[in-house]
Image (cartoon, rainbow, N blue to C red):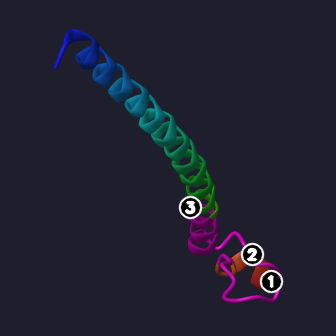
């Protein structure tokens, strides 16, 4: 094998690696978009859980109500 053949082989390997890097770059871009979407969904779920646990989603007549006990002044 001469120098020309080795150079040609090296050049073809670089071209093949470039194609692989380009393909991997597209896959990483797609995965990043999916990750952002999952992050948004998880944030919405966390918010819903926090609202449910603090009772802020309770409207009038739904679920147990948190009220202060009556005072002596209000009984008169």
- Circle 2 SS class: helix
- From which residue to which does the magenta span run? 45-68
Q: Quadrant of the C terminus?
A: bottom right
Q: How far apart, in angstroms, are the residues tagged by discs 1 and 2?
A: 6 Å
Q: Position of residue 27 (x, y in %)?
A: 51, 46
* Residue carrying label 1: 76
**Closer mark to the observer between disc 2 and disc 3:** 3
Q: How far apart, in angstroms, are the residues tagged by discs 3 and 1?
A: 51 Å
**Between residues 75 and 52, which one lies in front from this camera angle?**
52
* Residue carrying label 3: 42
Is residue 74 one of those drawn in magenta?
A: no
Q: Are marks 1 and 2 in contact (CB under 8 Å)?
A: yes
Residue at horizontal 64 percent and vertical 80 percent from the top: 69
Can you tell which mark lies on residue 33? none
Q: Give the mark nearest the N terminus, 3 or 1.
A: 3
* Residue carrying label 2: 73
Q: Position of residue 56 (x, y in %)?
A: 69, 69
């Amino acid at each position: 094998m001469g120098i020309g053949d080795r150079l040609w082989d090296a050049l073809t390997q670089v071209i093949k690696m470039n194609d692989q890097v380009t393909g991997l770059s597209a896959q990483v871009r797609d995965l990043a978009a999916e990750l952002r979407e999952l992050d948004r969904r998880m944030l919405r779920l966390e918010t819903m859980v926090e609202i449910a646990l603090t009772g802020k989603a309770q409207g009038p007549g739904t679920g147990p109500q948190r009220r202060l006990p009556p005072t002596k002044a209000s009984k008169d």
